[in-house]
Image (spheres, rainbow, N blue to C red):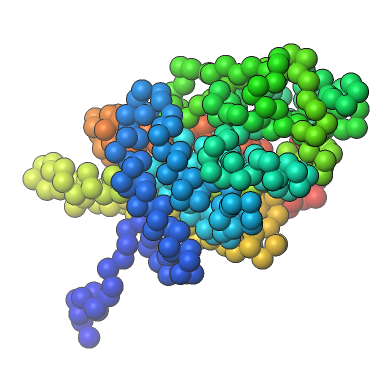
Amino acid sequence: MSATADNARAPRLDPLDLYDVRSMLQEDERIVQDSVAKFVDEQVLPIAGECFEQERFPHELVPAIAELGLLGSSIQGYGCAGLNAIGYGLICQELERGDSALRSFVSVQSSLCMYPIHAFGSEAQRQRWLPQMARGEVIGCFGLTEAHGGSDPANMKTHARRDGDDWVLNGAKTWITNGSIADLAVVWARTAEGIRGFLVEKTFKGYSATTIGHKMSLRASVTSSLYFDNVRVPDENVLPGVVGLKGPLSCLTQARYGICWGVNGAAQACLRAALDYCATRTLFGKPVAATQVAQVRLADMARKITTAQLLALQLGRLKDAGRLTPEQVSLAKWHNTRAAIEVARDARDLLGGAGISVEHAPIRHALNLESVITYEGTETIHQLSVGRALTGLSAF
């Protein structure tokens, strides 16, 4: 049989899924992916460039996000969808195909705010907050990072002391996603007992949030600084189930897991844009896609995306099996985010002069990924986490 006949019979590959990862998904997981993909195609992509250019968070999309069950999607009960880890990963992937800002919003709400309330909160706290947060009626933010601390959360200065039946909270947090639009802040602070989590309501006297502007990345995301000036927090608003850094770090593991999937969506959007542009752009008498240089670069993008997809899928299976470790998440966050930012930059370059226009997705994703590769643990931090797992020695 000739090679031509073999090629004619071979199924056409999906350029964005060369290893047919979709065939490895369960039916309910594919339904989740399809519903979120439809939402992104119809409601996110038409306004993503405009929101980025105008530095505007698309508040109008929150009701639809909630209606789809994307907030706290992995939580069982309390009005949440109760999806498995793969389902949550696919949500992140499709949302970030639209824009990293939207995935960040859902990630903070779900992994950094609803998760600690569910995992470490009292039943009264769960009943009070989780249903409202699942419906998008209460927006949360996660207060851990401080200006002087960065990658060293143990260097925390924000503190709280007991005063009768209340706590008095003082300090500041910065680079907080959703901060200025949040109704509830999950704030981590030093106490005499160790680091504790506090549910700070926006109406509490002495609490304020200011928006950080003039960003060149995640422009469609709200980023803020939080300030606590003798904020009185009732004891009923303290998370009772955890003391120490284990609390916030476990939240970060949940969020980093979502990033491992999300950046694949950004990379897929960039490869799609590059493929479309190279197919229609004619130079020296032939499409750019017909040149060896373009094909090698496109193939390299596909290689990086395929590797990242398989890493994310196995990571999700480990999570659903209860065998996930933080070091495994670090490896995937490091690899997949690095792969995505390289794909975005190369796609931007292949588009030539058109590549710097927000009319095309690659420049927007490339700029957004500069933040994603930094937050939730810088690339170096994740490399050192893997290094510690390999050697048994900490270089922190």
Tell me which residue sits at (16%, 43%) in the image. Answer: 281
Q: Residue furthest bottom?
A: 1
Residue 330: x and y, percent?
Answer: 64, 47
Tell me if residue 29 comes above or below residue 47 in the rendering.
below
Give the image location of residue 54, x and y in percent. Answer: 36, 23
- Residue 169 position, x and y percent, is 79, 21
In percent of the image, x 70 and y 62: which residue is there?
322
Please tell me whether residue 141 is drawn above or below residue 331 in the rendered image: above
Q: Position of residue 295 (x, y in %)?
A: 28, 52
Q: Where's the C terminus, which quadrant?
A: top right
Task: Name the quadrant containing residue 382.
Answer: top right
Residue under the image location 37 percent in, 62 percent down: 18
Can residue 293 be seen here? The reply is no
Number of numbered markers: 0
Q: Residue furthest left?
A: 285
Q: Nearer the viewer, residue 166 or 383?
A: 166
